[in-house]
Amino acid sequence: MNSAMNNFLLYDPFVYDDQNQNQKKNPSYRILIVEDEMIVAMDLAYKLEEYGYNIVGLIKNGQDAVHMAIQLHPDIIIMDIDLPGRMDGIAAAKMIQNKIATKIIFASGHSSKDPRIKRIIEEGIYPFVAKPYYSETLKDIIAEI
């Protein structure tokens, strides 16, 4: 199996939530989550699905994020800044936006004093959400973009 295929998960919450088996999915935003902590990514995906968003995948690193974003064309990418491997979330976002039109929301558990985060916030080009993720805050950010 290709090593890139080991680092992402296509997510269908209805596999994990039997109570929702008969619910109709809301055809709203298609969201790709790029987060190296899979338990965090799955929790976030579940919460966003509860709001009616369609989660198209969970990705663990920047290189796979670029590959899958180009393949899946999500409407929104929630991108952790710190990712394992040679490419962080900021570099991955730049590569993705050079290839496809998508909206990116950056996320990090680091302080707003971190120069990378400070630059993102000051430039105002990308929305930013601090981790841990608060689903209401993220829902509001998604609604604004």
Image: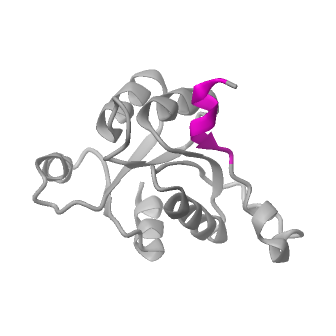
Q: Is residue 101 visible?
A: no
Q: How many marks?
A: 0
From what the image shows, is residue 110 above or below residue 116? below
Q: Point out the stretch of residues depicted in magenta.
A: 2-10
Residue 48 left/right relative to 24: left
- Rendered image quadrant of residue 46: bottom right
- Rendered image quadrant of residue 104: top left
**Which quadrant is home to the N terminus?**
top right
**Which quadrant is home to the C terminus?**
bottom left
Residue 61 in percent (x, y) is at 45, 39
Residue 109 left/right relative to 74: left
Q: Is residue 129 visible?
A: yes
For the rendered model, the colour scheme is: one colour
Residue 15 left/right relative to 54: right
Residue shown at the point (66%, 65%) measured from the top left = 52
Residue shown at the point (47%, 72%) measured from the top left = 135
Residue 118 left/right relative to 96: left
In reply to whether residue 9 is colored magenta, the answer given is yes
Residue 29 in percent (x, y) is at 60, 52
Residue shown at the point (49%, 35%) measured from the top left = 65
In reply to whether residue 81 is colored magenta, the answer given is no
From what the image shows, is residue 99 above or below residue 61? above
Residue shown at the point (68%, 45%) measured from the top left = 10
| Front position in the image: 24 or 79 | 79
Residue 101 in percent (x, y) is at 47, 31
Residue 117 in percent (x, y) is at 19, 51
From what the image shows, is residue 75 above or below residue 134? above
